[in-house]
Image: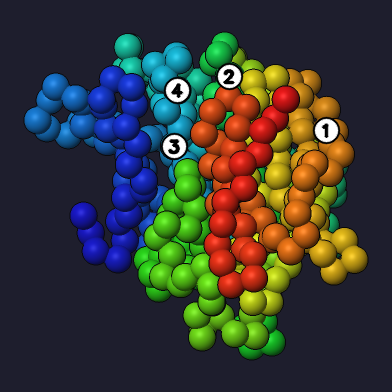
Amino acid sequence: MEERYDDLNEFYLDNSGDLVFTKTHREYADNITEASFIIKYAQADTLTSYKIKLDKLLLDDIQVKVDNFNNRYVFTSLFYKQKRSNIEGLYFLVWDKATQKNVLENQIEFSDELKHEARGEGNWKSAFNDFFIRNIIIKKDGGFIIGSESYYTTSRYNNWNRWDYLNRSPFLSPSDYYYYNSGYYGSYWSRSLWNSNSNTQNVRHHAENIVIFSIDKNGKPEWNNVISKEQFDDESDNLISYQLMNTGGQLHFLFNVNEKRVLLLNDFSVDGEGKINRNPTLKNLDRGYEFIARYGKQVSAKQMLVPCFYRNYICFAKIDFN
């Protein structure tokens, strides 16, 4: 490890007992220039490293997903064409454990039409500069779906800069919760659920549009779609962003929407063809409860637990999907 320049990503354990994680090298919080993934096989007492060939590709940050059904690992990242330029597309690599070879690798450039749809407010050419990969959902046939979300902060003192949040300890920069715990956000945070740190005062947290990509088993893009939303909070970012519920036939995106000064938990679902439906408001939502949606955890095929604020208490809600 080269201090200040090398980083290890999260550690993932597959159903065979093998441990996998990525190692990346970047200089001065810039784009990734070297990358590899490392496996600790269950029956081995050494680490095995496999290099990811980047060529001239500049990656943002590499996310990992274990595909236990197909015995594979999926690595994906947003990419740039030039240093500190606009994000141009999505890169992914699928590695097969049985053959120990890459079975899929591709880079998909975002169309101008998609950038216009995803941008919200602002310059469409830089539409994806605020986006972070949030989810990788595996399909049985070897394809996968990627969920991403726009997240940024604003303040009267400093402009938001993507590179300020990359390659830092989460204890020093708690705002970047995506890259340090993509499976269960927030457990590494230095601030509590109750209060934000003093250094976050006068900072507004924004979580906006969600863009979903579907990749087929051959590594080709099938469809993409955008869920439009606009969330912000001046206190902290606990009540913004979303959580995903996978019921098999549909993906449910749960997040708060401010309606008449009341936060209501909304459910947008996406089917296998990419069609988005806004479902009716969830039944039995008691008044006074504020759902911390992105801390929710799917606990079975049709059930999710979501923490809530109620006055000065934290409680939990059980959501059943029929």
Splitting the image into 4 quarters, where does residue 121 fall?
A: bottom right
* Amino acid of disc 4: Asp
Kind of element beneath mark 4: strand
Disc 3: CA contacts within 10 A as few (<14), some (14-19) or many (>=20)? many
Tell me the tag on residue 276. Answer: 1
Kind of element beneath mark 1: strand
| Total numbered circles | 4
Task: Give the mark, 3 or 1, whose residue is nearer the N terminus.
Answer: 3
Q: Which residue is mark 2?
A: 139
Residue in the image at 46% along x and 72% along y? 191
* Amino acid of disc 2: Lys
Residue 144 or residue 81, whichever sits in front:
144
Marks 2 and 4 sit apart, C-alpha to C-alpha, by 9 Å
Q: Position of residue 244 (x, y in %)?
A: 63, 39
* Amino acid of disc 1: Ile
Residue in the image at 87% along x and 61% along y? 259
